[in-house]
Amino acid sequence: MASRIDKDAAESLRTLPGDDVRQIMWRYADRWDLQMLVQSARQVARGLVARLVAQGARRTHEWTEEKAQLLEALDAAGLTAVYVDPQYGGFIEGPKNMALALMAFELAWVDGGAATCSLATGLALAPIHERGTEEQKRRYMSLAVPGGPGPGKAPWRGAFCLTEPLPYVGVETGLLSGKVRIAEWRDGEEPILEVRKRGRFITNMAFANFVTAAVDSDDPRIKGSCMVILEEGDPGTFDRGSPTRKLVHQLSATNDPIFHLRIPASRIIGGYRVEDGVIVPNYNHSEIIEAVFKRTRVTVGLMTAAKLLSAVEPLIRYHRERFRGAEGVPPGSPRYELGLQQREDVLHRLLDIWATGEAAASLGFAAARLFDELDPLERQVNQWLEQQGLRGTARARLFRQRQQDALELIELEAMPETKRDRQRYEQLAADPLVRFIRLDALANVFCPAVKLWNTGHGANMLREAVSLMGGYGITEDCPGFLGYKWMDAQLEATYEGPEAVQRRQLSLTMTNEVFLAEFQQWIRQMRQIASRRPGTGACALATAMQLWLWTLKHLQQATDAHGAKLYQGARQSVTFPMADALCWLLATRQQILDVIELEEKGPQNPNLADGLAGIVNFFTDLAHAHVARAAGEVGRICAELVFGANRHPSWDDPGACFTQDDLVELEQVVPGLAGGPYDVIDESGNHPVKAGPCVRFDGYEDFLKLRVRLDGCLTGAHLAKDRAARALTRVMIPAALDYPA
């Protein structure tokens, strides 16, 4: 790779990457259905949605007739039916995580509220899809499809009602003030339930026909919590509530509803059983939302990634045209042609935004593909477990036992084929439970990582994008709606759990033995890539990964200066930064893998034959530059945690220093010792002016070697960024954005 880049130094990015590039990088070049879905979503986003935003539809909290056009456009484009399986009226076979991710990405490219509006009914259906009974699935999935069995064949819209009006918006999903009790239970008949629920920040409530709501038992005859399905025609109060006075996502309808309804017990999602006269839901509300959020957090993360990548073209155009039209700036002059791009600052800062967007998209789509692979396997395993009668602790015990098989499979897979026990390997690779344990360990890390890094760091980088527009960035007519996108990202960072929730989950799942075994193999993978493609920065990333792994193992065993264990749930000042560092590694690794995919598969696409070398060279340099940023973050976090909890040496510590006379005597025994880096107290007892003797690094030798190696591995990263910056000054962009300002 390095020699080819040197040889083709003039070959760089000619135009911004299009669909042919993205289909390869994000692995859907062979999915015609997904390609058509992308085009349909793009037409809605860059047509109606862009016009609504440009015409000021975001200026009101109310759901208006003007905004309601969006629902009809989504129906007409087939986007409403994406969530639904073909047997219920949908059109996409199999898992739909990648389909939903691509749809959300295209809509959020223009407006996050439009994407949320589209996804909200899918979120309402998700509890039914993941844990509902077959009867529940058949009814509500069919009703949600345009042209289905509903009145006038208009599709039913849904809302997901989880959060309560607790103080400060009530984002705590474990606390429920919504209650359910038995209103009536006649012998031989189905129980009738009374549901009371007040929701907060509930999307789609302005027009929802049904609601999936989380409630807790208020009756000794109902055990625990559950989720129920509420319909607008149920007896009682179905009050949509007042609009939430939010500053963002105004193209989605958000209200604070009030429900007081009577429903049949068959509306308990997942069904129930009766034990000793007590209704026992098959799933409590936590089990259901875990299954739901495990997947839907990925699409939210990709909404922010879309915003970052959508900012690239408007920023290039703004920087180039900044001085055009001014006196003394004639056409053809460097200032006229390049504008602000004459200066490194805007180029390098824009590259940071672009690289973040690429890494965020790479990580998000990788997670979506992972869940597409996991979903059918999970259903197969759950069905087998139910047949075996394994629930609760028995199921957990089985998983712990079979985890060793998953570790063995990973070990065998890493071996050369000539040394591998082929029969054992094939046996383990074909075992659905072993495969599930392996994929589930990855999914439990990838999901919160996408949500945390994409929306958290992504929101910070969108602020950078707005700042690169100058004062124009915070105006309503800012090209690309960057000001709106920056504000919308703040909400996306709290959707389905704010950063603290994701960090908490990561701090638990990233210590899973199966994940760490995979992570160890990824380090080897990056080393192998570095030997073939050194220009990607894979060598530096591998060292950063190794440093993180060393630090994690150290923190799990180490204590602070007071003897308290460092890596534990209560020490979030330790566990949370390690989760942040891991996200940098995961995102950057996936970015490199996508570049390699483009280089290897790109020649198969005749549309890319002419400019492929330049595209690959640019993305290689962009990845290398981003590796340097990721390595810096990881190195900083790890060094602070490894050394920061130790007590600094004091001048009063026994043996902390040599006196001048001691050093002279020792010099006679060990020549050259006096020239070493030792703290020395002179004859009058004075010592160097500092807090205490220099820190010694006994026991930290391996960490120091890795840290020094990591710094050295950054060699060439800045040159890669310089090359990518030059490409920004030459890349051709369209004469205008393909959606209105």
Image (cartoon, rainbow, N blue to C red):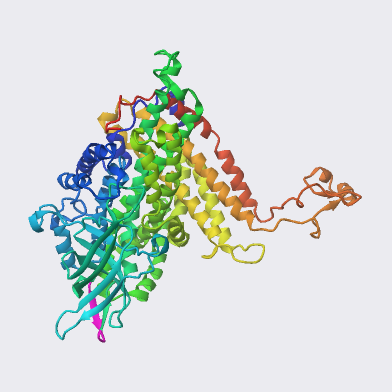
Q: Residue 637: percent from the left, percent from the top?
A: 56, 50
Q: Is residue 397 above or below residue 469?
A: below
Q: Residue 4: percent from the left, percent from the top?
A: 43, 28
Relative depth, front residue between 380 and 503: 503
- Residue 260 in the magenta stretch? The answer is no
Left/right placement of residue 539 relative to residue 684 reads left
What count of labels does the image hold? Answer: 0
| Location of residue 158 (image quadrant) | bottom left
Q: Is residue 520 visible?
A: yes
Left/right placement of residue 287 relative to residue 459 reads left
**Residue drawn at (46%, 29%) of the image:** 347
**Residue drawn at (37%, 43%) of the image:** 305
Relative depth, front residue between 373 and 688: 688
**Residue drawn at (48%, 40%) of the image:** 627
Q: Residue 548: percent from the left, percent from the top?
A: 53, 52
Q: Is residue 624 above or below residue 150?
A: above
| Location of residue 159 (image quadrant) | bottom left
Q: Residue 44: percent from the left, percent from the top?
A: 22, 40
Relative depth, front residue between 517 and 237: 237
Dividing the image into 4 quarters, which one contains the N terminus? top left
Left/right placement of residue 393 relative to residue 543 reads left
Q: Is residue 418 visible?
A: no
Q: Is residue 300 above or below residue 185?
A: above
Dividing the image into 4 quarters, which one contains the C terminus? top left
User: Which residues, given as a range, are shown in magenta?
Assistant: 271-277
